[in-house]
Structure formats: structure tokens, C-alpha cells
Amino acid sequence: MPAFRIAFLTHEPFFPPSGGGSAEAVYLVEEMVRRGWEIHLFCPKIPDAEVVEKKFGIHLHQFSKWQMGRYAKLRNFKYLAYPFFLERMVAAAAREIKFDLIFSQHAISAVAAGKLKQRLKIPVVMNFPDLLTGFMETWPRYIAPRAVVNSLKRYELLLPTKYDADGVLTVSDTLADYFAQTEFPRAKICPIYYGYDAQYFPFRTQPSPVNPAVVVMHGSFDAHHLGKIAFNAIRYVSERRRETIFRFIGKKTASLEKFLARAKKEIPDFRYETIGFVPYAEISKHFLDATVGIVPYEESAGTHCAFVAKLVEYIASGLPAVSTPLKSIQSYFKNDPMVKFSAFDGNDFGAKILAAIEESPKSWQLSAAKSAAHVQSELDWQPLCRKAINFTEKVLVGAKSA
């Protein structure tokens, strides 16, 4: 008999990771399996399912009514409908399999997990790698009216209280504070941050300046990544150092195409590279000749709660970084000389990029090594996932005792 039998719920394809919270799921599952737990993973259909089951030692239960994923058409509407079908999938499986706990990844699956707790009478741990609806604050008002966004955000934050979750994992202390403000017990909340895989982001050395300078940004390139701050910062730098190259690593989304089209039209001599989607294990190769990494996110509850993995990966690789002052990462990196925090202003962000470009590598090389070592010791996936699953195991043992 396994130590515990877990129903792991997610709205993202499990493997290969598509970015964001999907990368975290892989490492959480590995830690559970390492402890001898039997994992039944409920997720959208993935390629090579039998190979993945064998690779991770899990049981896959796949949703196949429609395509899911961060780049799927009509993504948001599909997300709204998915919890209903996910709940039915798990409930059907539970007629034959006795689960000890339901573990939900992201707010979308937390809706199904909460309803299943009431239905199956088993404990639930909800993991929130972000405040999903909080990012909608940066969307145009004609798409996301503020009254609607505030209502959705309130609904998301009340999920643990509404369904009496047995435990909540959060991506940051800031998000933990948001849940605590809903009167959900602080003792049942565990902030774990967001990590990276140290083997894929080795520390680099860069003894001399790169010319021309390369400013790198990677991610899923949603609307909150490429707003007014990013545009004005790029214009500020391009007008003062025309040879500067801006490198975008990630799928060429509609948001990125629109951003680049405007930049080419309005910024003389704008120079850029689009790398396209890059597997997680290969991202750091595109940092080797870079000068500075950037996180020019617009301000919102979502971005303030996020523990931005991109910044962690820049620092782990020994790459100086510039970021807007997002509460979670500014709190963690406030004394780190490798990170420059701007105001929520494009010109100030651009000035910080220029300062990083003009700084001699010799002045920050020692700091780079120390910062990378600190990140590796605290934010590699293994220690983070141990913390998360220790907390989950405590919930399980407590439920068994009760």
C-alpha cells in the first residue's frame, strides 16, 4: 500500500511544461512520488501519455473534450468551463479509488477541488502559484471592466474560506497576506515562493562588456508583460544607445507582435531579436551573451503577488536584472546588488537599464557569484518542493488523526 493516494488537479498540460505554474507541478509531483505516494494526475490531454506515466511513476487521467493550454484558442472561456468537467472526472475516479487528499494547482482547479471536498469528504490543499484574476487589472477596461475584475478577484481569494480548505500554499508572502485578510486562518497558509531548476541555469562568467549590449526578456508575453512601461523603457534606451539589441525569448504571441509592430513604427533604429519558444532546459543559453535581463511588468495585484521566476533565473545565471518594484520580489531581493528596481515608469526603467549596461562587469562579478549561490540554496525546486510537501504531509497526517 502507498503511504498516501493523491488526486493532483491542474488545468495545464502536465508535461512538457508550457511555462508559468506548469513547471512547478512537475517538481511537486516528483517530490510526492519520491515519498512513496501514489499520484493520480488529472490534467488536459498530453502527447506520449504512456511515456510520461512511466517517466514520473504516476497515473494520468486526461481531459480530452477540447484543447487546453495557455496558447489555446478561446482560452479564458475554456478555463471557466473546465472546473465543472474536472470535478466530474475526479468524482468518477473516486468511485473506484480511495483518495487520501486532493491537491489543486492554480485557482481554476481549486474550484473543482473545493466542490470535491464537500462531495467526497476528504482533505484539500490548494496551491496558488499566482493570483490569477489579479493580472486582469492591467487589461483594457473594455475587455475587463473593473467591477467584473474586482468581483472575480474577490471570488478567487475567498475560495479557501468558501470550501474550508485544509491548507493553502502561496507563491509569495504578499499573496499569503491577501488570503489572511479574508479571515482564512494564517496557520493554514504556507508561502513557498517560486523556484527554478538549478541544473538548467548554471552560473556564467562574463569578464568583459558585450558590445552591442543585449537586453533580454523571456516569458509567455501576455498583456501585463508588454505594456506602457516596457514600451517607454525600450524607447528611452534606443534613443540613447541605438545599437542596443532587445532579445525576446518566448512564443510570438499576438501581444508581442502588436508590441513589436508599434516599436518598429515609432522608435527609430529599434533593434530586436525574437527567439521564439525555447524549452525550459535551453533558456539560459540565450543569457550567455546578454548584458541585462528585464522584468518590466505593469502594476496590478497579480504582479505584486507574483514571485517572478524570470528574475530568479537571471540572478542564478549571473545576469544583472532590472525590474519594476513588485512587492514580492522587491521584498526578497531588496538588498541584492544584482537587481535594480525602477519606479512604475518607463523612462525610469529605461534609465535603470542604461545604468546596468554602462556598469563595468568587474564591479558586479563578485556580487553575482554570491547572489547566484544564495538563489540556488533557497530557490532551487528541490528545497521549495520539500517545504510544500512537508506542509501537505502535515495536513494529511492531521486529517488521518482526526
Image (cartoon, rainbow, N blue to C red):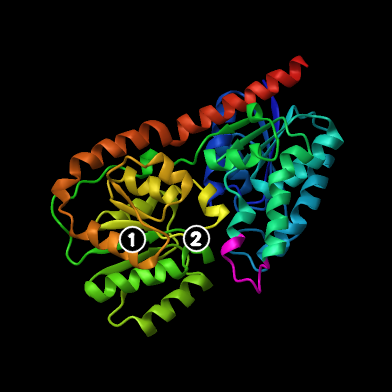
Overall secondary structure of the magenta section:
loop
The residue shown at (13%, 54%) is: 208
**Dividing the picture into quarters, in which one does residue 217 lie?**
bottom left
Image coords of residue 240 (percent x, y): 23, 73
Looking at the image, is 32 positioned above or below residue 16? above
Label 2 crowd (10 A; few <14 / some 14-19 / many >=20): some
Looking at the image, is 100 positioned above or below residue 368? above
**Dividing the picture into quarters, in which one does residue 241 lie?**
bottom left
Q: Secondary structure at mark 1?
A: strand
As for residue 140 lying within the magenta part, the answer is yes
- For the question of whether residue 17 can be seen, the reply is yes
Q: Which residue is mark 2?
A: 220
- The C terminus lies in quadrant: top right
Mark 1 residue type = Val
Image coords of residue 94 (percent x, y): 82, 35
Residue numbers of the magenta segment: 136-145
- The N terminus lies in quadrant: top right
Would residue 315 appear left or right of 142 to someone viewing this image? left
As for residue 278 lying within the magenta part, the answer is no
Q: CA distance from mark 1 to mark 2?
A: 14 Å
Q: Secondary structure at mark 2?
A: loop
How many discs mark residues in the rendered view?
A: 2
Q: Which residue is mark 1?
A: 216
The residue shown at (24%, 46%) is: 204
Q: Nearer the viewer, residue 386 or 341?
A: 341
Would residue 286 appear left or right of 180 to someone viewing this image? left
Mark 2 residue type = Ser
Label 1 close to label 2 by CB (< 8 Å): no
Q: Nearer the viewer, residue 30 or 296?
A: 296
Q: Nearer the viewer, residue 371 or 12?
A: 371
Image coords of residue 395 (percent x, y): 68, 24
The residue shown at (27%, 44%) is: 337
